[in-house]
Image: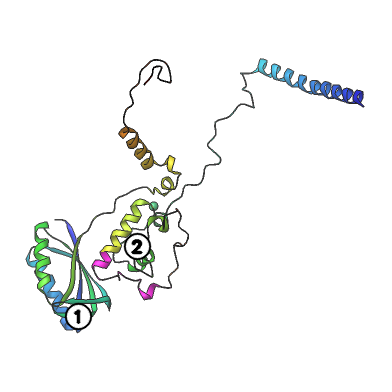
Amino acid sequence: MPSYELAMVLRQMSRPEIVSVLKRTAGTLLDRGCVIRKLENLGTRALPHKISEHGIVHREGTYFNISFDAAPTKISDFMEEFGRDIDIVRRRIFKIEEPEEFQCTLHEEMLPPAYRKDVQEMIDIAKRKQKRKFKYNSGLDYYPFQK
Amino acid sequence: MLQFARVAARSVATSHRAVVTPLLNSAITRRDFSAPVENKDQPIDIPNPFEKERRVCILCKHNIVPDYKNVKLLSQFQSPYTGRIYGRHITGLCKQKQEQVEKAIIRAQNCAMMPTYHKEMDFMQDPRLFDPEKPIRPHKY
Ligand SMILES: [Zn+2]
């Protein structure tokens, strides 16, 4: 089962209400055979902009993050289920992926254009696209007859 | 006057020869004794001394992987006036890191963690990582 991360914003509520919402969301996750790895509270604060959801305009919210392992086919069900919950203002599910190892290429990018690999490739493509000119093979660099 | 100049020229020529001949002799004797020594004036194989130090972008240097929950870091790559993400020619990041930063910022904005039309007021006084007025690469705007 791949790992996922549920980022959600709950509407402004009292503490026991938040607990009940969290229990509800965790319950739906567990009912579908998920494994909850982590539950994070990112705090209550004013939203960056007002959000209209379920017919109410929200200006403040509590941020929560739940990491869980689930079957990929279940993700759309979760999105649908949490979308119907009127206490959840916004919900997003992301796959947790290991960052790829790579070398910093800033040095190569800062080289003059003629030395950059992508520019060289572009020049090659332009050369390939040029129309071929017929060669007479007369050993002369001009056409000896009248045209 | 002219004669004097000629004499001077001859003296210079003779002195020059006097200097040159012993050097040649020593070179020959040295060659006789040991293995052939190459001419000192020939170019030698050394790494380019004028090569510039390898540049590394600020996120690669500190080995930071941008995350959408780290809003304070991400907002440093956002314009305080329009909320738009600064381009690679301004931020001075490498291609991959710039892509990661852009992806993380869009994610954070999607999760309503970050504003889209301005920079968070709490982060306005943060130190600047770059100067948008002086891009590292020229651009047409
Ligand atoms: Zn880099």
Work out which quarter of the rendered image holds the N terminus of chain A and state it.
Answer: bottom left
Residue under the point 89% across and 23% down: B7
Q: Which mark is residue B85?
A: 2
The answer to which image quadrant residue B97 occupies is bottom left
- Helix, strand or loop: magenta stretch: loop
Magenta residues span: B107-125
Residue of label 1: A57
Q: Is residue A95 magenta?
A: no
Question: x and y percent of residue B115 in the render?
Answer: 30, 71
Taking the image as shown, residue B1 lies to the left or right of residue B34, namely right
Work out which quarter of the rendered image holds the C terminus of chain A and state it.
Answer: top left
Amino acid type, callout 2: Ile
Question: x and y percent of residue A56 in the render?
Answer: 16, 81
Q: Where A143 falls versus A105 (above or below)?
A: above
Q: Where A82 falls versus B66 (above or below)?
A: below
The answer to which image quadrant residue A61 occupies is bottom left
- Using the numbered discs, state the Cα–Cα distance from disc 2 to disc 1 in whole angstroms: 27 Å
Does label 1 lie on the same chain as label 2? no
Residue under the point 82% across and 22% down: B13
The answer to which image quadrant residue A52 occupies is bottom left
> As rendered, which of A124 and A26 lies closer to the eye?
A124
Taking the image as shown, residue A130 lies to the left or right of residue B138, namely left
Amino acid type, callout 1: Val
Residue under the point 12% across and 66% down: A79
Using the image, name the chain to which the residue with label 2 belongs. B
Using the image, name the chain to which the residue with label 1 belongs. A
> As rendered, which of A93 and A58 lies closer to the eye?
A58
Q: Which residue sits furthest bottom?
A: A14
Q: Secondary structure at mark 2?
A: loop
> As rendered, which of B38 and B127 lies closer to the eye?
B127
